[in-house]
Amino acid sequence: MTAPLPKAELHLHIEGTLEPELAFALAERNAVTLPHASAEELRKAYAFEDLQSFLNLYYELMSVLRTAEDFADLADAYLERAAAQGVRHAEIFFDPQAHTARGVPLETVLAGLGRALEAAPERHGISTRLIMCFLRDQSAESAMETLEAARPWFGSLITAVGLDSAEVGHPPSKFREVYDRAREAGLRLVAHAGEEGPPEYVWEALDVLKVERIDHGIRSLEDERLVERLVRDQIPLTVCPLSNVRLRCVDRLADHPLPRMLEAGLLVTVNSDDPSYFGGYAEDNFQGLRAETGLTDEQLRRLAANSFRASFLSPAERDAHL
Ligand code: HPA
Ligand code: ZN
């Protein structure tokens, strides 16, 4: 195999990098019982119907993450795999409410993630940013409390906020005040939209939440005016091909709309979302696209360059990668 292209990963849920073997190791360390006999048995459960069926398992497995050391080990394991796949910069999501709801304090989560991220440039040759996501199927009040609780880490460990979890029925506009507050605090803004939800949710993320990037956004293609807007403003879309197939947003990789999105002039990037669950890390997504959609080497190089262009790196840091 030729060396993977240097790239940035901009859509990666750290909890979605929990490999079955690490889940069992942490379960043992923390005396947590998992309702699966073994790592192999657990892998067999990774056949999803839709986003919700994945989220059920994703939240269940998080029960093994309890201490700062657990979060540090999780993030370090991801960074090691990412480095082998050509990732040089990673903007990493985490879901604080999924941990605080289980009695794991925010400080514990951030102590562990912070330790791994701080070591990443030296240890793995990867620079990082951390993006705090709100669970959109929980209340706006809960999101606001989470935002306020995280204030001590703004601008140091936490760079941006995002919005994830069950999309349909939870439009971006539900979080208008939370995003207003985050913007006032100087945080960068992103949101998942147009994964399972309609193009209207992408419009809302842009016009109500005023996000700088759209996570997924594949359903934007259903709305010509929206595509024009995204092209005009060169709003980055963090697309996750293997995720879209596993969650049945797209039938097969060969049918993935990414080549059409590139053709349309959209600023598209390729990402792994929840790689432990969806069958591949960053370069695996690139290779899958190459094999199944016939994207050319030139198009793959453009996608890798887009990933740095769409990142929250400073212009000077960005140029150093291009
Ligand atoms: N979509 C929405 N929420 C998520 C995802 C996803 O793909 N992964 C983890 N939380
Ligand atoms: Zn995601």
Image (spheres, rainbow, N blue to C red):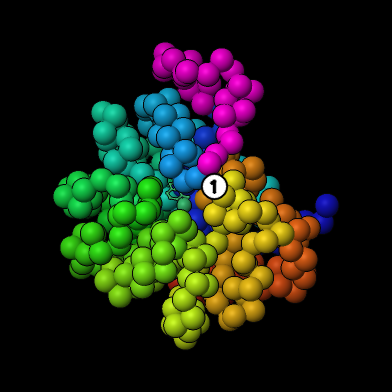
Number of other residues with Cα within 10 Å of mark 1, as a class: few under 14, some 14 to 19, many 20 or more: many
Disc tally is 1
| Amino acid type of the residue that numbered disc 1 sits on in the rendered structure | Leu
Q: Quadrant of residue 184?
A: bottom left
Q: Nearer the viewer, residue 148 or 268?
A: 268
Left or right for 127, reference 180: right
Residue found 53% across the figure and 18% down from its top = 36
Left or right for 222, reference 114: right
State whether residue 53 appears in this view.
yes
Residue 95, position in %: x, y?
Answer: 36, 44
Q: Nearer the viewer, residue 86 or 182?
A: 182
Looking at the rendering, the stretch of residues picked out in magenta corresponds to: 23-49
With respect to residue 90, does 208 lie above or below?
below
Residue 107, position in %: x, y?
Answer: 28, 38
Q: Quadrant of residue 212?
A: bottom left
Residue behind label 1 places its C-beta within 8 angstroms of ligand 1: yes
Residue found 47% across the figure and 38% down from its top = 53
Residue that carries the numbered disc 1 in the rendered image? 247
Residue 202, position in %: x, y?
Answer: 39, 68
Secondary structure under tag 1 reads loop
With respect to residue 207, does 293 lie above or below?
above
Residue 116, position in %: x, y?
Answer: 47, 41
Residue found 50% across the figure and 45% down from its top = 50
- Which quadrant would the C terminus be assigned to in this image? bottom right
In magenta stretch: residue 220: no
In magenta stretch: residue 40: yes
Left or right for 189, reference 261: left
With respect to residue 164, does 56 lie above or below?
above
State whether residue 132 appears in this view.
no
Residue found 62% across the figure and 66% down from its top = 257
